[in-house]
């Protein structure tokens, strides 16, 4: 059911050109117990990629959509001594890891698949109407990273005196430590939810604190300048939603009428206006636009290495390749369901007709045996079933 939900959502929103990415999970692996779902997240993203590729191949969709997972910056595994930034790095590595030299083959069959020499296969529950036989996704480069973007939900930057390098209490800055931990990631990194709760902003600074907890949004320039070599953007939280984060008033939003901006939003817009376009500041930030060669340190890690590292923190995961794929076109699924329903109806009708005919023949036989062949008037007696 999860796959079909995701497939329907993709099919619905892919037609809009301003939709940039699809979310496959939000803060799923927040503790050691929840990490058991990690292989399912990978398999879910894998199936949606296979689905989109096949739909484009068959002409049902015009494009595919990048897939993103969003994690929480305070996720914990391995005990209190484990660095949360290390956990976040492992989360990115796990969701983007690959097994080099493996290809992906989708088999249009419900039968068991003998993997044989192909080390990575997924069985596709699809009907023969999709072409039959095997469909190799190797040309589509699937079998690589399940996710295309990693998002991080961060609620820090809660003081007007905070800087990139240091928090207001003098400890190492949250943004700096995240930048340092994730700067070699193989997929783009963004802040998918960025913003301190109103109730926490400057709460210990009586001179700067406001009744509304208005945020200054000074981190906008930090992400756009100091983190630009490895960070790809941010989403300010939030237009409408939890009251402790809203930037507009008059909600909840009805989907039609524009909400009224607050001072919090005006501060955000002011900081956003200071940001120099990436193209203008790329040289200063040391960003190269030449992608002809890729440094090996930015390539996805080997999944077996990441899983071994997670095991050292007490997280044991089964291989997501063992999860059977539900990837299929919705159209194939529809025709398969309707096709099965058609044959069930035919079976019921034929069976019912056969039963009626047998009863009729039996009634005729009984009638012929019990009714005299001629009436009292000498004419033949007619027997039948109405």
Image (cartoon, grey):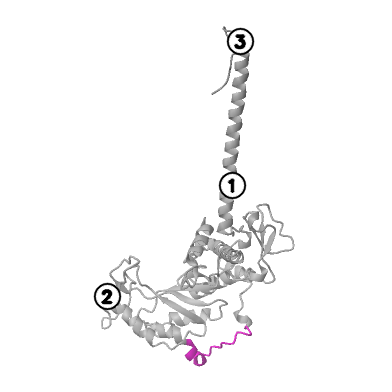
Residue 154, image x, y percentages: 42, 74
Residue 316 in sight here: no
Label 2 SS? loop
Residue 221, image x, y percentages: 41, 85
Q: Earlier in the sequence, mark 2 or mark 1?
A: 2
Q: Residue at x 53, y 90 (%)?
A: 286
In front: label 3 or label 2: 3
Between 210 and 9, the one lying in front of the other is 9
Q: Residue at x 50, y 71 (%)?
A: 21
Which residue lies most toward the top here? 376
Question: Residue 141: which quarter of the image?
Answer: bottom right
Q: Residues within 10 Å of mark 3 (few under 14, many from 20)?
A: few
In front: label 2 or label 1: 1
Which residue does the numbered mark 2 point to in the structure image? Answer: 212
Which residue does the numbered mark 3 point to in the structure image? Answer: 374
Between 64 and 115, the one lying in front of the other is 64
Residues marked 2 and 1 touching at CB (< 8 Å): no
Label 1 SS? helix
Which residue does the numbered mark 1 point to in the structure image? Answer: 340
**Above or below, 296 relative to 124:** below
């Amino acid at each position: 059911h999860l796959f079909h939900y995701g497939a329907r959502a993709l099919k619905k929103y892919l037609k809009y050109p301003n939709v940039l990415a699809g979310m496959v999970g939000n803060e799923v692996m927040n503790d050691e117990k929840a990490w058991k779902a990690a292989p399912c997240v990978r398999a879910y993203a894998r199936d949606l990629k296979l689905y989109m590729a096949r739909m484009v191949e068959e002409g049902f969709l015009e494009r595919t959509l990048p897939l993103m997972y969003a994690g929480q910056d305070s996720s914990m595994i391995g005990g209190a001594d484990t660095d949360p930034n290390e956990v976040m790095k492992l989360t990115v590595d796990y969701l983007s890891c690959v097994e080099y030299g493996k290809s992906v083959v989708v088999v249009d069959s419900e039968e068991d698949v003998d993997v044989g020499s192909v080390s990575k296969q997924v069985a596709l529950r699809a009907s023969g109407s999709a072409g039959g036989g095997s469909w190799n996704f190797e040309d589509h480069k699937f079998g690589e990273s399940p996710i295309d973007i990693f998002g991080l939900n961060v609620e820090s930057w809660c003081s007007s005196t905070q800087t990139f390098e240091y928090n207001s209490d003098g400890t190492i800055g949250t943004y700096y430590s995240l930048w340092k931990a994730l700067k070699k990631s193989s997929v783009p990194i963004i802040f998918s939810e960025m913003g301190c709760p109103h109730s926490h902003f400057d709460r210990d600074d009586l001179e700067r604190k406001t009744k509304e907890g208005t945020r200054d949004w000074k981190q906008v320039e930090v992400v756009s300048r100091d983190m630009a070599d490895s960070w790809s953007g941010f989403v300010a939280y939030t237009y409408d939603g939890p009251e402790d984060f809203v930037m507009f008033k008059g909600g909840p939003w009805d989907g039609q009428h524009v909400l009224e901006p607050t001072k919090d939003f005006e501060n955000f817009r002011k900081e956003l206006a200071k940001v120099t376009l990436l193209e203008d500041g790329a040289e200063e930030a040391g960003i190269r636009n030449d992608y002809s060669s890729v440094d090996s340190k930015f390539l996805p890690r080997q999944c077996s290495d990441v899983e071994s590292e997670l095991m050292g923190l007490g997280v044991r995961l089964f291989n997501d390749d063992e999860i059977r794929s539900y990837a299929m076109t919705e159209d194939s699924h529809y025709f398969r369901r309707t096709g099965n329903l058609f044959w069930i109806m035919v079976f019921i009708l034929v069976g019912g007709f056969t039963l009626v005919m047998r009863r009729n023949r039996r009634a005729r036989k009984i009638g012929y045996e019990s009714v005299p062949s001629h009436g009292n008037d000498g004419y033949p007696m007619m027997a039948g079933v109405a």
